[in-house]
Image (spheres, rainbow, N blue to C red):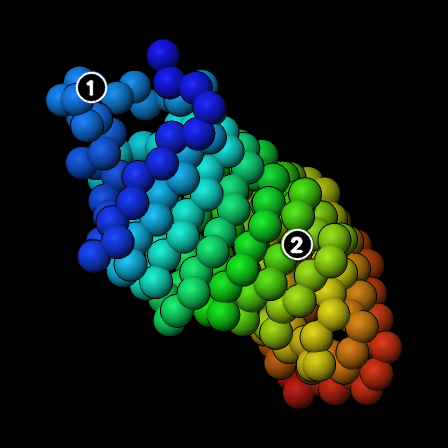
Amino acid sequence: GYGGVVAFAAPDGSLDWSVLAMVDGRGEPIPSVFGGSLNLSARDAITQSALIEVEPLTTSSGGVTDLTGYGGSANVVNTYNVNNSATGQTSFNAAGDLVVGTINSVQLVALGAAGAITQSGTITAGSLHTDSVSGTTLTGNNSVNSFSADNSDSGNITFNNAAVPLTIVAINNAAGNVAIDNTGAVVISGALTATGTVDVTAHSPLTVTSTG
């Protein structure tokens, strides 16, 4: 079986999961479920044309990382870590709950989960978008320049951050409350809607540029 850490790298180009899921370096099939963690790294893009079922998953790329699922299904990954050193955005969808590990990106990171989104590490990103079914709770040490979020079925959207300023692009919670706390100024540029309460705390000026 496959245990410990399994790593694949494409230092001179892009990486696609379908090729890696077929065969290993010995010419033997690789199971879709690993007993350990999986690290994928590429100089350019990381994409997929087969499902990923591992725990945890770490991606490091210099381009776009597009891991939103395959064949109409999302990836079976509980914990996801991101390191994007260049210009590409990162997109990832999980089939259930998603724990965000460490994220380091200067671009957009878009995370989707068919359950709840929580975190165990630090999130540093140019922009962050979350799309959850059972709530989003990101109350760790985060440094994000702009934030947007959607939640559809149950739970709250809670986000703590430190940025000067934090721009809230848009937030929609069809099932609960919204609570944003930023150490620094907050600029609200889009609509904030919720079935419950909406609380935005800015430890510096709060600017609202949208009346939605």
User: Which residue occupies the extreme top position in the image?
Assistant: 1
- Residue 142 placement (x, y as % from top left): 69, 61
- Residue 143 placement (x, y as % from top left): 66, 67
- Residue 161 placement (x, y as % from top left): 73, 65
The mark that comes first in sequence, 1 or 2, is 1
Out of 182 and 81, give the one closest to the viewer. Answer: 81
What type is the residue that disc 1 sits on? Pro
Q: Which residue is mark 2?
A: 122
What is the CA distance from the residue labelled 1 to the residue labelled 2? 35 Å
Residue 169 lies in quadrant:
bottom right
Element on which disc 1 rests: loop
Point out which mark residue 29 bears. 1
Q: Residues within 10 Å of mark 2 (few under 14, many from 20)?
A: some
Q: Is residue 194 above or below residue 81?
A: below
Residue at x-position 34% and y-position 62%: 62
Out of 135 and 52, give the one closest to the viewer. Answer: 52
- Residue 198 placement (x, y as % from top left): 79, 63
Q: Residues within 10 Å of mark 1 (few under 14, many from 20)?
A: few
Q: Quadrant of the C terminus?
A: bottom right
- Residue 87 seen: yes
Residue at x-position 71% and y-position 48%: 137
Residue 61 lies in quadrant:
bottom left
Asked whether, in this view, residue 65 is left or right of residue 82, the answer is left
- Residue 200 seen: no
Q: Is residue 52 above or below residue 127?
A: above
Asked whether, in this view, residue 147 is left or right of residue 73, the answer is right
Residue at x-position 46% and y-position 38%: 57
